[in-house]
Amino acid sequence: MVEEKSIQPSRSAQNNLTQFTSTVSLLSEIEPSKLNRAPTGMGEFDRILGGGVTPGSLILLGGAPGIGKSTLVLQIAGLLGQKKKVLYVSGEESQEQIKSRADRLGVHAPNLYLLSETSLEVILDQVKEIKPEFLIVDSIQTTARIDFPSSAGSVAQIRECAAEFLACAKSQGITVFLLGHVTKEGDLAGPRVLEHIVDTVLYFESEPQKSLRVLRAHKNRFGPTSEVALFEMESDGLKEVADFSEVFLKERHKGPGSCLVMAMEGSRPLVLEIQALVSKSYFGLPRRMVNSMDFNRALLMIAVLEKRVNLNLGSQDVFVNVTGGVRVKEPAADLGLACAIASAFGNFYPSSDGVFIGEVGLGGELRSVSHSTERLKESERLGFSWAVVPRKSLKNGAPSRLKIIAVDHLKEAIQWLQTESKSSSQIFEKEESLS
């Protein structure tokens, strides 16, 4: 006789640590529940979530090492812990280290509990005992189930731990914050399913050696996904930056190759400075270097300038940079980018301050962009004198105190810019003029 071994179901299938289930119901019979968002007290963070944290939600916060993930959640825990129970679990720091960091940040909350633990079972037991309204886990990669043979941070451990925290959040109405490590490519470490399991995915971004931190919502089941929040790292923690434009304009350099664009980050218009440098190339293949913008988009604008505006850039090195460390992704910055390159090539720049708004097509034509009214209103609020926009984008009118230069083609915009510009030939050696 041959002995047959019975196949047993996995431990996770037999006994989930946290039960989360429901009965079958008709959609018409289910009473909709009102989302009673809880404000954290940090306005920028609440706005990016859609007005505050939603009870029973699972929020994943990712970012590079040292960017400020633990600092941000500890500050949020201190604000929430003034009136509500918060359990802060760290698998990377001792309680004494967290306390020291809290003192430095000025975090003093009567209802903030600290736990240094990596065992998922122990963490969930403490959740049942303390019954917090908010749970913070730093980080998901250091948390592990004891009954799983793989080590913490493995694909299986991250998947199972995230699923248990999801069940905990949904069954008990606890808002759970998970901090996640990222790979050297900038992606969240672990399986892709982690981002599918959670309700909200937030990413911290920053340029090297910059104190500014940009928090973006890449996924949000309870709010918009296009919003961003800006913070500045100081000695006593992260500080909210409410006025984006003021930060990026305070160190602006006026001169050839500098143009301002009105970009949209989520629902907020943001003024950014695009800088371009054009210099004669001494190599057979001219250099093209682009920072904080899409490289291929910049190459496209250079090609349009050469073909449609007759600029001889084939023998010129072209360098493009967006100041402040914020990456420009939308095509509405095309016009500002093209004008910055033309300005650097021709050594001219406008004598007054204004913005460029518009997408540039391959034929050099200007196309209208979304949120034109909001962009123009923000330009007026900041005291700009003029705005160069596509003619087709003026359907809803324009602010009364802002001079609108409506153009149909890129060449018209550059010709106007050259007419209104202040020549810098007295400062720099004059290059070949625009055709």
Image: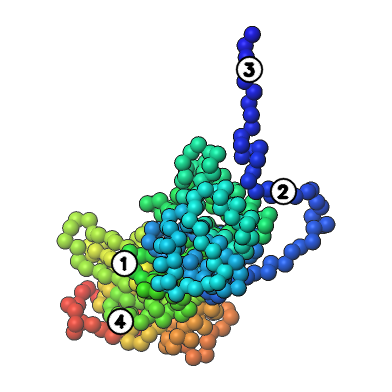
On screen, residue 4 above or below 406: above
Q: Nearer the viewer, mark 2 or mark 1?
A: 2
Residue 361 figure quarter: bottom left
Q: List x then y, in percent, for residue 431.
A: 21, 74
Classify 10 Å Cα crowding around label 4: few (below 14), some (14-19), many (20 and above).
Answer: some
Q: List x then y, in percent, for residue 75.
A: 48, 70
Looking at the image, which residue is at 53% across and 72% down? 109
Q: List x then y, in percent, for residue 32.
A: 76, 62
Classify 10 Å Cα crowding around label 1: few (below 14), some (14-19), many (20 and above).
Answer: few
Which element type, helix, strand or loop, lies under badge 2? loop
Label 2 and label 1: CA atoms lie apart by 47 Å
Classify 10 Å Cα crowding around label 3: few (below 14), some (14-19), many (20 and above).
Answer: few
Q: Which residue is mark 2?
A: 21
Q: Nearer the viewer, mark 3 or mark 1?
A: 3
- Circles 4 and 3 in contact, beta carbons < 8 Å: no
Q: Nearer the viewer, mark 4 or mark 3?
A: 3
Q: Which residue is mark 4?
A: 254
Label 1 and label 4: CA atoms lie apart by 23 Å
Label 3 and label 1: CA atoms lie apart by 63 Å
> Which dot marks residue 4?
3
- Left/right placement of residue 68 relative to residue 27 reads left
Residue 424 figure quarter: bottom left
Q: Quadrant of the C terminus?
A: bottom left
- Circles 2 and 3 in contact, beta carbons < 8 Å: no
Residue lying furthest top in this view? 1
The answer to whether residue 434 of the structure is visible from this angle is: no
Looking at the image, which residue is at 43% across and 55% down? 92
**Mark 4 belongs to which amino acid?**
Lys
Q: Which residue is mark 1?
A: 209
**Earlier-in-chain disc, 4 versus 3:** 3
Residue 329 figure quarter: bottom left
Label 2 and label 4: CA atoms lie apart by 61 Å
